[in-house]
Every structure is written in C-alpha cells, then in structure tokens.
Amino acid sequence: MALDNGLIHSASLLSDIPSVFQGYKPRNLNGRFQGAISMDEALKQSLNIPLIQVFHALTPKAFDMQLAEVGIQLDHEEANLSVGLGGTGTDLLTLVSLYRSLATGGQVQPLRTIWQPGYLNPHKEAADQTLLSPASSWIIYKTLSEITAPDRVVPTIRRQIAWKTGTSYGYRDFWSVGVSPDYTVGVWIGRPDASPVVGYLGATQAAPLMFDTFDQLPRDQRQVTRPSSVVKQVICWPGGKAKAATPADQCAIQKEAYTVRGITPPTLQTDGQFMRPSLSAISWPTQLANWQHMKGIRPAGGSDSQLVEIQHIKSGQHYFTDQLKELPLVANTDSGELVWYVNHQPHSEPALTLSRYEGPVTVSACLEAQCDVKTIVVHGR
C-alpha cells in the first residue's frame, strides 16, 4: 500500500534504530539495530522498526480503510500502530487470500472450500477486488521470493515462492504463507486453548511444513511477470530521489530501485514526514544521523562513494563442508574501514570456516553507513 501511495520504492532508505512512534516502541526480534537499511532488505529480514516507520507514514486508518474496500475486516477495536506488526485478529483463510493477491496483480480473489474431492461448498459468486496495483504487488512478490528458504531436502520441483512467517505475542500462534505463480499455501500452528508454546517461531515450525506442502504440488504452469508499470531507477541515498533528479554532491550512495511508474519519493524521517532536501550539503534523516554518530558510524558523504558489494557469494547458495572448507571473504573494496559481520556478529578473519556453521548464515560487509548482505546455507557440520 505504501508503494501505491507514493511513500516508498524498493530501495527507500529506512532507519533501523531505537525509535518511538506516538508512544509506540517497536522492537526487532533479534534485539539489534542495523541503522541505514533499504525497504526490501528490511522486509526480507522482518525488521519491525523500519516497517513501523513506513506503516506510521501510511497510517493505520488508511490501512484499515483499504482492506475494508476489498471486504477484509480485521479484529481490533481501534486502528493503531501495533496492527502493523500483527496486533490484530484474523484467520488463516484471510491471510491466504491477501497473500495470493501478490501473484494475481493485486487482485483479491474469493476462496472456495473443497469439503471433499469433487465437491465445492455452496457460495455466491463474488467479483475479484483490487487491493494493490500490479506494480506494487510484483515488487513485494519479488522481494519476498528472495528470502532464503529453511534448510531442507532439495525439492524435486524448483519454483519461485514468495513467503512470510509470523509469531504472535506470547508464542501462541505460528504461521507461514507462501505464494507461487499457481499455488498459495498457508500453515497455522497453535493450541486450541491458545496456551503458549515458548520457543516456537513461525520460521522454524510453520515454514518447513509450508515448503514440504509445496513439494507435493504439481509444477506451476504460469509465471509472475514484471508489469510495464514497474520502472527500474538508480536512486540516491540519503535523499531517496532518482539520481537524475539529485545534485551530484548530494548523492552519497547509489542504489538500484524498483519503482511504481518511475516515482521516486524522498526519504522518510522517523516521524513519517518526508525529509526536506538540503540546498547545499548531504543531509541524512536526523535521528538516523544522530544514532550513527553515537555508534561511531560515519555516513558516506561524496558523489564518489563506492557501493560495497560482496564478491563470489550469492544469496541462497548452498555450501557443503565436505566439498569446501573455507569461503574467502572478498568485497569490491580494500578499504581499511570495511567491517565484516557473520550472523550479525563482527568477524575479523579473512575467510569463513564453514565447519563452524550449519543452516542459514548471514554474511555482511559494511563500509560507513552502507552494507551488502548475503545469506547462504551451510550443510554437513
């Protein structure tokens, strides 16, 4: 919705820092902060703080109203910011219906229930309802399909699956929904009496079942294709606007972004307002700049700033320790200020010893306020 409302594009600069929004203080599940982060990376990593930054700008009321237009009514007394992180009630069928729209050009389609083979429950024919534009639904579909799947047996049929998980407050519900071009699978795990199961997560309990279900389904016959209304643009941080519309001395970092009809909105401040462009110098969002200064992070500040890229590693790659012992850590810069992180912890060695890890491993290379992040999967510990 924020994409369609001209608030963000896929590479919008967001602030993953300690924040309070109208008295609401969201927290990330891992308890850490990354500082400057793009919209698509925040979504892939399920970072609560930057997502609430966008939800605050959209407003909970607008969110509720847009859902109501397609016949979706969530279960909460008053629209508030906690709704953006699941602080509301709904059911699995509603989630499946909403996520399905990502593969149907933003159209919410009525569900039909099969009670037994060959028999559909009686229902009134209902027309499809438009929730998102084809452009914004494709951008979100592409983003969620780039999340690394849980460690599992290599599937017989490889398919593009956009997926997300959730864990309710108090560890009472765990869910995962995945969308491929032809199929949508939803899994809910929980106890009928709503008693908690501490330690369970949607990503570790529901997601593997969801992917196992996909493995039993026939091959997809369709593809989710990029609509012509999605325009790829080179944008600038910190301002967020297209490079072509940004003075060279105010383009500290360049990023490629998917936009709706080429629109490149300016960066949001943490209060939900658009950042005012500086007339003479690079200007980062105020609270983000203050946090970076406190942490000793120096924001990039020149048109010749180099975009950090991790070399020879691709997100989603699988590595087997019986075939490869070490993975060299190489970036496209030899700057002495480059810092490496493995699973969000500082890493000072020149290589990654694979035998120390099992399952998904996040590798990050950071220079000043900009990072490149890759997630790989290690087998055979």
Image (cartoon, rainbow, N blue to C red):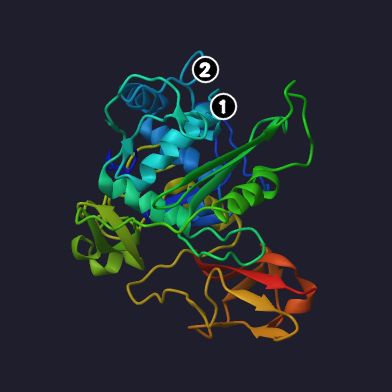
- Which amino acid type corresponds to the residue marked 1 in the rendered image? Gly
Residue at 57%, 73% in the rendered image: 317
Residue 285 located left or right of residue 368: left
Does the CB distance between marks 2 and 1 fall below 8 Å? yes
In the rendered image, the vertical position of residue 229 relative to residue 371, given as above or below: above
The numbered dot on residue 76 is 2
Q: Mark 2 or mark 1: which comes first in sequence?
A: 2
Q: Nearer the viewer, residue 205 or 40?
A: 205
Q: Amino acid at mark 2?
A: His
> Relative to residue 124, is residue 332 drawn left or right?
right
Q: Position of residue 201 (x, y in %)?
A: 70, 43
Instruction: Report whether residue 334 is seen.
Output: yes
Q: Is residue 380 above or below residue 196?
A: below
Q: Residue 277, how many percent across, how many down?
A: 27, 51
Indicate which disc residue 64 carries: none
Q: Which mark is residue 87?
A: 1
Residue 350 shows in the view: no
Residue 195 in picture, x, y percent from top left: 77, 25
Give the image quarter of residue 148.
Answer: bottom right
Question: What is the distance, in whole Å, between disc 2 and disc 1 at their CAs?
Answer: 8 Å
Measuring 51% from the left and 18% from the top, which residue is drawn there? 75
Image quarter (top left, top right, bottom left or bottom right) of the C terminus: bottom right
User: SS of the residue at dot 2?
Assistant: loop
Residue visible at 37% across and 29% down in the picture: 110
Question: Tag 2: Cα neighbours inside 10 Å, few (<14), some, or many (≥20)?
Answer: few
